[in-house]
Image: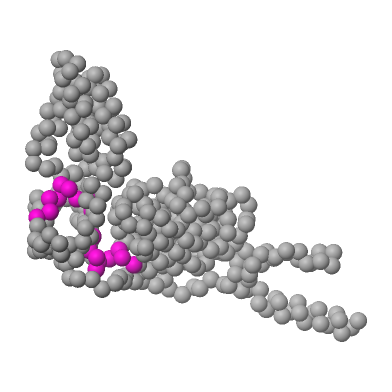
Amino acid sequence: MFRTMLGVALAIVFLAAGASAQFKDQAPVKDGKKEAQPTPVPTLDKGKAAAPVFKGPPAIPGEVEISLLNGSNVRMILQSDKLEIATTYGNLAVPSKEIVAIDFGLHFPDGIEAKIQQAIKGLGGDNFRERDGASKALVELGPYSFPAAFEASKLADLEVSRRAKEVVKQLQAKHPKKDLKATPLDKVITPEFTIVGRILTPTIKAKAELFGEIDMPISRMRTMRSVAGIGIDIDVTIDAGKYANAGQWMETEFHVDGRSAIVITAKGLVDTWPQQGGNYIVGPNGLQGRGMGMHVPAMPGRRINGPINGQNYGGMLIGRIGEDGEPFTIGERYEGTPETTGKLYLHIGPSPWNQQSTGNYEVKIARK
């Protein structure tokens, strides 16, 4: 009997020594039976967050992938030395070799802008045939007419606004959201910073293996990205101490082009309530991964409508595309083809107990 009690005592001491590396809320022994326990999780790595690492496959110097408005993608070698860009602070000449990616704004082919303005005016014409013809013309002009039709839909003239709203509705039904550009401004991404302005160069000189040297009209392009540039494969570390706070998003240099499939994987540990001695440590799936309460499952790719609150998304890895993009869940792994274009931003759901979370997640982002 004495030996048995001594063995039990020693076992308790041994387990207590390793408790700092496990959850402290494991179930106790009750009525001689050990209740179910959560899977032990290692202690947080409190080392410094690693700097982002950008890597990609070897590529031909100047090689770019261009996404066109007709839905096709082509790879070409840039021949233009530079692009002229008008900005609020003056004109810039950006060397082509410094360009990582471009999100093109709305550029009109020759003669299209005049046709759109004429059609907008025709929406308020004197007879039905003229008004009906103007509506059909705007729909036939496709995404090019969307911004003008959208603005006309807000006019005080009831006939014009009604017809313009119908045009907008038809355009939205016929074309992907990413093609209905509402801004003439271009986003030119370089390794140092992003330039927002208007590209003045009407065409980009490029060379294709099958077609030789050609002038590509900017008006036909949706996006362009350097095959060798940032955005192919990225490793980043997101720190909960900063990015598990409401409104704080980590900007990555990964550019989503709206066409390519991407894969995001994450690992690591975040303590959503450090003062409780490790009881609330979670992984990228958040508190749902611990089975704690009625938290929303990670369900990678699920859109988040409304605020990102800790009660539902505490500790969960979340993403969005663009500064004003719609948040979506990532968790431990996301794989999909987003239709939106722009930089990828990351965020960690805040603590549901209004505490400052600690720890970090290591995130890998790659094109499939």
356, 96: nearer the viewer: 96
Q: Where is residue 186 in the image (x, y as percent from the top left)?
A: 19, 50
Can you say whether 12 is above or below 250 in the image? below
> Is residue 216 rendered magenta in the image?
yes
Q: Where is residue 16 in the image (x, y as percent from the top left)?
A: 70, 76
Residue 108 in view of the camera = yes
Can you say whether 140 is above or below 204 in the image? above
Residue 200 in view of the camera = no
- Residue at 58% in and 51% down: 295
40, 311: nearer the viewer: 40
Image check: 133 left or right of 246? left
Total residue callouts: 0
- Residue at 46% in and 43% down: 305
Can you say whether 6 is above or below 194 in the image? below
- Residue at 26% in and 44% down: 179
192, 168: nearer the viewer: 168
Q: Quadrant of residue 20?
A: bottom right
Q: Quadrant of residue 292?
A: bottom right
Q: Where is residue 331 in the image (x, y as percent from the top left)?
A: 49, 58
Q: Where is residue 333 in the image (x, y as percent from the top left)?
A: 47, 61
Image check: 275 left or right of 223? right
- Residue at 37% in and 63% down: 368
> Which contiguous range is marked in magenta?
215-233
Image check: 284 left or right of 111? right
Q: In which quarter of the image is residue 167?
A: top left
Residue furthest to the bottom in view is 3
